[in-house]
Amino acid sequence: MYKHAGAGWSIRPFTLNDRISCLRIFSDCLRDFPWRGDWKAYLPVLQNAFVSSRVLVAEEPSAGMIAFLTVQMRTGYVDHLFVDEDWRLCGVGRGLLEVARYEAARPLILDVDMQNVAARRAYEKLGWHVVVDAKPLRPGQQVRLVSP
Ligand SMILES: CC(C)(COP(=O)(O)OP(=O)(O)OC[C@H]1O[C@@H](n2cnc3c(N)ncnc32)[C@H](O)[C@@H]1OP(=O)(O)O)[C@@H](O)C(=O)NCCC(=O)NCCS
């Protein structure tokens, strides 16, 4: 589907066998968000996204799965984007968003936590903008962004 020639990782559609690896990345990432509380509280939303959203995974031959993204194809809303800590700043998030943007054939949107400074910096570098009149999922705690 998409292969990064230099770095060796590639992006492909999710299969049911990927669930455990997605959960590992998901729980590892959410543990770094103390403001979110217990990561298990977010499991139902993730499980639902596995069924109702388009799910893309990034993998590397020796590391296995290193990231995943879920996007609602009808709206372009990105429910989840999580990159394994060891694989950040390698273009994986950019790659997943580019494939999702291509498949959705429309600008993507997402809600990012105000406290999530690293992700907000990343989206800024990727050219995303704040949607001024939008209602994020958690008003006051998140900001809604739109992709180029
Ligand atoms: C946010 C996240 C998805 C970014 O993924 P990533 O694979 O590290 O991002 P990329 O390597 O594709 O970087 C894309 C751009 O953002 C920049 N960037 C990424 N992380 C950054 C950071 N912490 N600070 C500043 N810039 C950053 C990169 O330098 C790159 O810009 P450049 O091409 O001009 O150099 C990743 O850090 C992550 O999974 N974080 C934990 C979970 C999370 O916060 N998810 C988002 C929820 S809305």
Image (cartoon, rainbow, N blue to C red):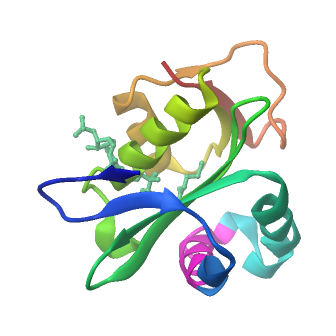
Extreme residue in the front direction: 1
Q: Quadrant of residue 31?
A: bottom right
In the figure, is residue 94 to the left or right of 105? left
Q: Residue 54 versus residue 32: which sits nearer the camera?
A: 54
Q: Position of residue 97 (x, y in %)?
A: 48, 41
- Whether the magenta-drawn stretch holds residue 26 is answered as yes
The span picked out in magenta is 21-34
Q: Quadrant of residue 139?
A: top right
Q: Residue 136 versus residue 110: which sits nearer the camera?
A: 110
User: Which residue does the image show at 55% across and 51% down from the upper left?
Assistant: 116
Q: Position of residue 106 (x, y in %)?
A: 61, 20
User: Which residue does the image show at 67% across and 37% down from the upper left?
Assistant: 110
Task: Judge whether residue 119 can be spotted in this image.
Answer: yes
Q: Position of residue 13 (x, y in %)?
A: 56, 59
User: Which residue does the image show at 56% across and 83% down from the upper left?
Assistant: 21
Q: Quadrant of residue 123?
A: top left
Eyeballing the image, is 51 above or below 25?
above
Eyeballing the image, is 124 above or below 96?
above
